[in-house]
């Protein structure tokens, strides 16, 4: 998938003051930044040489800004690059709970929700899509808060009537989101939910939403299909093909599918006709049926995949992927059987299961599988932290590689990632990534955190924690490389979030380093009272910052145990109240 180039990303990031005026109005500012920052070294008819402005006399004549292209030419190039950029999505997370108000402090209720948003830079490229996703997220979060209040009222009453509080099972409501497809044509999202409100078992199901990337319009089946007249019969045909060995688990398919209509949007009213729950993926149109829809609860849910290549006349051309061989990453919470992982032409069931220890009465490990080939993840019990929350991701690369990423939460905001090659028909562990983070930031006013999605094998963001001057998370961009392991071409980390103690303030003057646009370093004096915003680091020797007037300043550091020195100065002597996260 095509990413925003580093030069364009810098230009977009520089336009921080853009206020919702859209791509067209923003172009002038972007072009201005590009001309000033990126074209300064081009050959020019103006013989005046660009010089560093640090320490220049303000009364000296303004230095001309060289350039070799007309603005219109740069604008055309930028617009073409922008139009080819995949929208970059992040996820917003919210968690809440309630406990009993007696001395037992039993958990009554837990609530989690994950909703999508565009990254800051991508929202400037696709403002209409950003607005649509924000509207969707706002509604989902409002419903989340209302549901939590109602469930707490209900659980409180049930708890009071429950005689054996030690045997009380907390109510749960969990709503997740994954990306099915994200490109310059379509963003298609999948919303699996899993709720427990007492009784023998919970209930789970799925929701979906698909948007036109450029207009932000939420799409209906009638928008993406040339005709829906024969859709029911096509779905029945593919159910029979994909579930040929298990057709006896279905009720009368003709009667069941007769209740569905492509003209109706899916909702929770369960009134006839019923709308399909669907998403567009890199491979085709996926249609989802939850428990009880086509079969009994014990049969789980079913997925039908109508491939673009099998039904070339079914789809509206503008919503068919332009890159037929683009790689993708798809998350699955339950087993899935729609991937031909070993290239033999047959669909395979892949999945992850936690391993329960009856002696300790808890989950102690996890296992992954393809069909009947099962592999334990940890060599010993408790090697896998929180195996009951482990998530599997199917990874298909552009060159046909087939992998599974098993992502296991550890502690705080960190994860362990186990990489398996699936091409042989058996999971073969190729490597292990210890404790990266997807964390971006946290809004204390709304209790909402943001984190990166894992859905594009060419654009994966993993962060690390650093404790230099303050605590910050910084990420690099990775791609799926040799043996399926994440690899990066980034030499530096981009700092996305600090511990909440910015701006860091200088309490005595000191000498630091200014790095000009040619990469040349020059000394600069930092005055008392100056503030710093962190932007990047190599993770070893320096942190790049921006001071209050916008000047980029590099701080070289040496860290030996708790002894931190900045440009040779003890850090506690030049910065006010250094604070770190626990």
Image: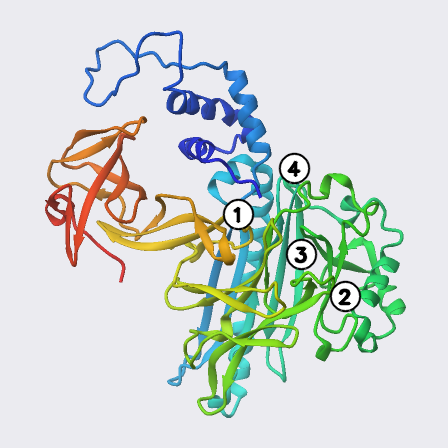
**Tag 3's secondary structure?**
strand
Residue for point 67% across, 42% down? 217
Indicate whether 157 appears above or below 286: below
Tag 4 or tag 2, which sits nearer the N-term? 4
Q: CA distance from mark 3 to mark 1?
A: 24 Å
Tag 1 or tag 3, which sits nearer the N-term? 3
Task: Residue under label 4, please give it.
Answer: 215
* Residue closer to the observer: 385 or 14: 385
Indicate whether 166 appears above or below 395: below
Image coordinates of residue 381 in percent, x first then y, are: 43, 82
Task: Residue under label 3, please give it.
Answer: 208
**Tag 4's secondary structure?**
loop
Which numbered tag is attached to residue 458?
A: 1
* Residue closer to the observer: 269 or 342: 342
In front: label 2 or label 4: 4
Q: CA distance from mark 1 to mark 2?
A: 40 Å
Task: Residue under label 2, please give it.
Answer: 270
Image coordinates of residue 535 in percent, x first then y, are: 33, 41
In front: label 3 or label 1: 1
């Amino acid at each position: 998938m095509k990413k925003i180039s580093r030069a364009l990303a810098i230009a977009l990031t520089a336009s921080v003051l853009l206020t919702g005026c859209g791509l067209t109005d923003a172009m002038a500012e972007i072009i201005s930044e590009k001309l000033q920052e990126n074209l300064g070294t081009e050959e020019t008819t103006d013989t005046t040489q660009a010089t560093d402005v640090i320490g220049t006399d303000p009364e000296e004549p303004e230095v001309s800004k060289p350039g070799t292209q007309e603005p219109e030419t740069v604008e055309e190039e930028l617009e073409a690059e922008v139009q080819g950029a995949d929208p970059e999505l992040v996820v917003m997370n919210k968690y809440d709970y309630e406990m009993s108000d007696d001395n037992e402090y039993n958990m009554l209720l837990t609530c989690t929700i994950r909703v999508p948003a565009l990254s800051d830079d991508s929202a400037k490229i696709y403002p209409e899509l950003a607005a649509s996703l924000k509207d969707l997220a706002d509604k989902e979060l409002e419903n989340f808060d209302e549901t939590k209040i109602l469930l707490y009222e209900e659980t409180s009453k049930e708890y009071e009537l429950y005689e054996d509080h030690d045997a009380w099972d907390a109510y749960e409501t969990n709503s997740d989101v994954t990306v099915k497809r994200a490109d310059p044509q379509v963003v298609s999202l999948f919303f699996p939910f899993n709720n427990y409100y007492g009784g023998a078992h919970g209930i789970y199901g799925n929701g979906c939403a698909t948007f036109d990337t450029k207009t932000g319009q939420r799409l209906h089946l009638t928008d993406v299909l040339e005709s829906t007249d024969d859709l029911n019969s096509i779905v029945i045909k593919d159910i029979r093909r994909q579930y040929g060995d298990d057709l006896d688990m279905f009720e009368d398919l003709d009667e069941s599918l007769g209740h569905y209509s492509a003209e109706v949007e899916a909702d929770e009213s369960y009134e006839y006709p019923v709308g399909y729950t669907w998403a567009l993926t890199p491979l085709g149109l996926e249609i989802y049926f939850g428990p009880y829809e086509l079969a009994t609860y014990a049969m789980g849910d079913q997925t039908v995949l109508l491939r673009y290549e099998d039904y070339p006349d079914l789809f509206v051309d503008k919503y068919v992927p332009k890159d037929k061989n683009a790689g993708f990453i798809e998350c699955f919470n339950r087993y899935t059987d729609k991937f031909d992982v070993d290239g033999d032409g047959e669909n395979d069931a892949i999945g992850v299961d936690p391993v329960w220890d009856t002696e300790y009465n808890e989950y102690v490990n996890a296992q992954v599988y393809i069909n009947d080939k099962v592999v334990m993840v940890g060599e010993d019990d408790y090697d896998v932290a929180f195996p009951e929350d482990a998530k599997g991701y199917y990874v298909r690369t552009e060159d046909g590689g087939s992998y599974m990423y098993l992502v296991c939460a550890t502690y705080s905001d960190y994860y362990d990632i186990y990489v398996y090659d699936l091409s042989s028909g058996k999971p073969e562990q190729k490597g292990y990534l210890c404790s990266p983070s997807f964390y971006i930031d946290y809004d204390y006013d709304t209790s909402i955190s943001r984190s990166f999605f894992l859905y594009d094998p060419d654009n994966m963001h993993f962060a690390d924690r650093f404790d230099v001057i303050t605590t910050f998370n910084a990420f690099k961009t990775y791609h799926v490389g040799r043996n399926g392991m994440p690899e990066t071409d980034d030499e530096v980390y981009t700092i996305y979030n600090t511990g909440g103690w910015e701006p860091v303030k200088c309490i005595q003057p000191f000498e630091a380093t200014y790095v000009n646009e040619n990469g040349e370093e020059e000394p600069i004096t930092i005055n008392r009272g100056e503030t710093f915003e962190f932007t990047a680091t190599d993770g070893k020797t320096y942190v790049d910052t921006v001071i209050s007037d916008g000047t980029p300043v590099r701080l070289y550091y040496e860290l030996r145990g708790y002894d931190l020195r900045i440009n040779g100065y003890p850090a506690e002597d030049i910065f006010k109240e250094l604070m770190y996260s626990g």
